[in-house]
Image: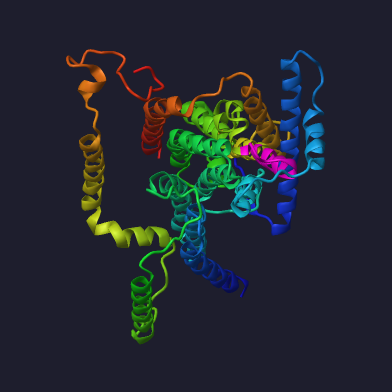
Amino acid sequence: MAVDVAFWALGVVATLAGAAVFYVDSMARATYALALSFVAVGLQVLFLHQSYVGVVTVLMMVMEMAIMAVYMVMFMGMNPALMPMSMVHGNRVAAAVATGTFLLLAAGILVVDWPTRRGAPAADVTAALGEALMGPKMLVMAVVSPVMVATIVAGIVLAAHRTRYDRFGDDLGRRPADDPQPGGVGR
Amino acid sequence: MGEATVTAVAAVWAVAAAAILGCLIVVAAALDGVLSARAQGTAGGAGRPFGEAARLLRQRRRTTIAADNLLWRIGGAGLVVVALLMVTVVPLDRWTLFDLDVGVVWFNAMDVTVWALVWLTGWGSNSAHALVGGYRFLAHGIGYELPLMFALVAPAIAAGSLNVGGIAAAQGGLWFVVWMPVAFVVFCLGVVAFSVWGPFAAALGADLAGGARTELSGVDRLVFETGRYALLAAGAAFAVPMFLGGGSGPLLPGWMWVLVKAVAVLAVLVWLRRRVPVVRPDKFMEAGWLVLLPAVLLQDLVVAVVAVAGG
């Protein structure tokens, strides 16, 4: 009983905090309202006995929102996000799309003929989930990771306006490198 | 050494856990007072932190224009809460409050929460110096967090478990600190860093008029400072089951060994404050990514090879 109450209370917190993202008038509050929403979802996942997934959700989302708050404040264009500002734009279209999506999904939930449970959950549901998600595709997953990292590095290399010639001079012989941001290990 | 498995105790014992953490905070603060007095060439000083606490309790609260009070208070008061949540997974020899199967990840999630809290403390007061302090902490965070995460991985690999009690029990023959010293040192650095302490106190630097805590006054400041000591104490306590064999040791009962080891680690961390200069976040970034991270990854590799060969 207490477990059920806690689970549903966390669901309410997650939903309200998610709604608060659009209601508040500050970048910092919007970001951390989203973080609270994710934390509530992560704690809900704990109730599903997916301890690892739940705790990692909390970990990653708090970290991500801490970084996101920095970017939001840094890059918020003309309004430097240090002042109160509206978190919404294109209200009418957005409201119509949101209502339509909600009705569609809610109708789906109510109309679908949900299957009844056959068998019992595995002893270690986290391992079972990982196996179900990635088991037969592990080779693809293992290959995708380095490709993604290489893409990120290549993207940064292409986007950076300074090249190794700016850092090390025309004959690449200058040491230490001429960096606008000095490094900590004396390169 | 045939250690008994960890048993979860009733929730009311959380009060005892909080009291123990409070004692560790008092010990750390008194020690810092003594060291501070000695640095100025005078004796005594153990009472200094308590005099300061009494002064802060009577101080009138400072207000700033257009402060975001909600976020500000959450940030300042959150550190103590996070430290309390950390110690829930630290077993006191045979007893633990929260026998979570992924306790190590729980600890990690709590220490990441400090990122949010320090930044919110800097943001909330609507003060330029405080906000710069908050950003400095995040810059340090990007430098220390990944090495810290991979340092936590090493004992988990060796024990084959993310359960803190399981990791403590796996050190029957040999403490992990002996054969994974790099991970232990990086872990301790991480604890110092997420407590915004000593070399990692740039976010609270005097060059920023106090950084993230610039505008904190009275009880708010007291709670914030208590939170830093609480994080330091919780981190030191967590090192005991992770690297220092939990409650194993001769003569004394296990729970007392846990406390003795925790106090020893805590004392070293407090002492570090006046021995190591503050590191600049921009300089530490490279040290973290080019020195600490490869070093701790190599440590993980060695541990993994040993675990596979031995298991």
Is B111 a magenta residue?
no
Q: Look at the picture and state if B59 lies above or below B281.
A: below
Instruction: Provide residue A31's location: percent of width, then percent of height.
Output: 47, 54
Q: Main secondary structure of the magenta part?
A: helix
* Residue A131, x across and y down, in percent: 32, 59
Q: Give me the residue at 48% from left, 33% from top.
A: B140
Which residue is more in the foreground, A19 or B96?
A19
Left of B310 or right of it: where is B253? right
Q: Is residue B225 magenta?
A: yes
Please say whether residue B175 is visible from this viewpoint. no
Left of A59 or right of it: where is B302?
left
**Residue with the most extreme left position:** A171
**Quadrant occupied by the C terminus of chain B:** top left
Magenta residues span B213-228
The reply to whether residue B143 is in sight is: yes
Tell me, what colour scheme is on the image? Answer: rainbow
Pick the quarter of the image with the N terminus of chain B.
top right
Seen at 25% across and 51% down, the residue is: A141
